[in-house]
Image (tube, helix red, strand yellow):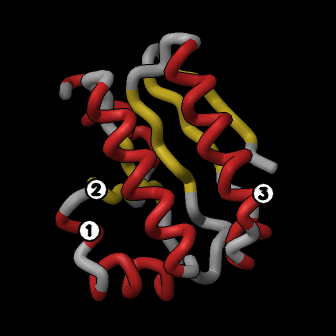
Amino acid sequence: MARVKKHGDVAIVTVDAALSAGDREQIEALKQVCMDLQAQGSVHIVLDMSELDHAPSLVLGSIIVLQKRIRTCDGELAILRPTERLQRILEITQMDALIRIYTDEEEAIRALVRG
């Protein structure tokens, strides 16, 4: 489902392309991975969405819920490498104003470590 890399208190979660289908089971599994990472000390979560063509509304809503949960623990959720189509969706829904978006993994890690 998702591949995870840890960099101190930042975790990079590569989201599987299957999430594009908006399957509830896949979405719940992603949320659980993120919550488990937080419980293990990863304060900040970066979702690498480079494999997703698009994100149905169920996925977008789940990302917002996840972001709120992470913020309650003084963490931050960010998006990494969205495809052009997904970037456009994030702009149309104005999610890009709520969640930081990065094109470079190292840049995302440096920004989140600094706060």
Residue 53: percent from left, percent from top: 63, 81
Task: State the separation of the CA atoms marked 3 and 2.
Answer: 24 Å
Mark 3 element type = helix
**Is residue 90 positioned above or below 49 on the image?**
below
Disc number at residue 37?
A: none
Near mark 1 (Cα within 10 A), the count class, few <14, some 14-19 or many ≥20, is some
Identify the mark nearer the N-term, 3 or 2: 3
The disc labelled 1 sits on which kind of residue? Answer: Asp
Q: In which quarter of the image is residue 102?
A: bottom left
The disc labelled 2 sits on which kind of residue? Answer: Ile
Near mark 2 (Cα within 10 A), the count class, few <14, some 14-19 or many ≥20, is some
Determine which residue is flagged by label 3: 25
Circles 2 and 1 in contact, beta carbons < 8 Å: yes
Relative placement, left or right, of 43 versus 29 is left
Mark 2 element type = loop
**Is residue 77 positioned above or below 38 on the image?**
below
Q: Quadrant of residue 39?
A: top right
**Is residue 12 positioned above or below 62 on the image?**
above
Mark 1 element type = helix
Determine which residue is flagged by label 2: 99
- Identity of the residue drawn at 53% across and 30% down: 11
Q: Which of 81 and 40 is in front in this view?
A: 40
- Of labels 1 and 3, the one closer to you: 3
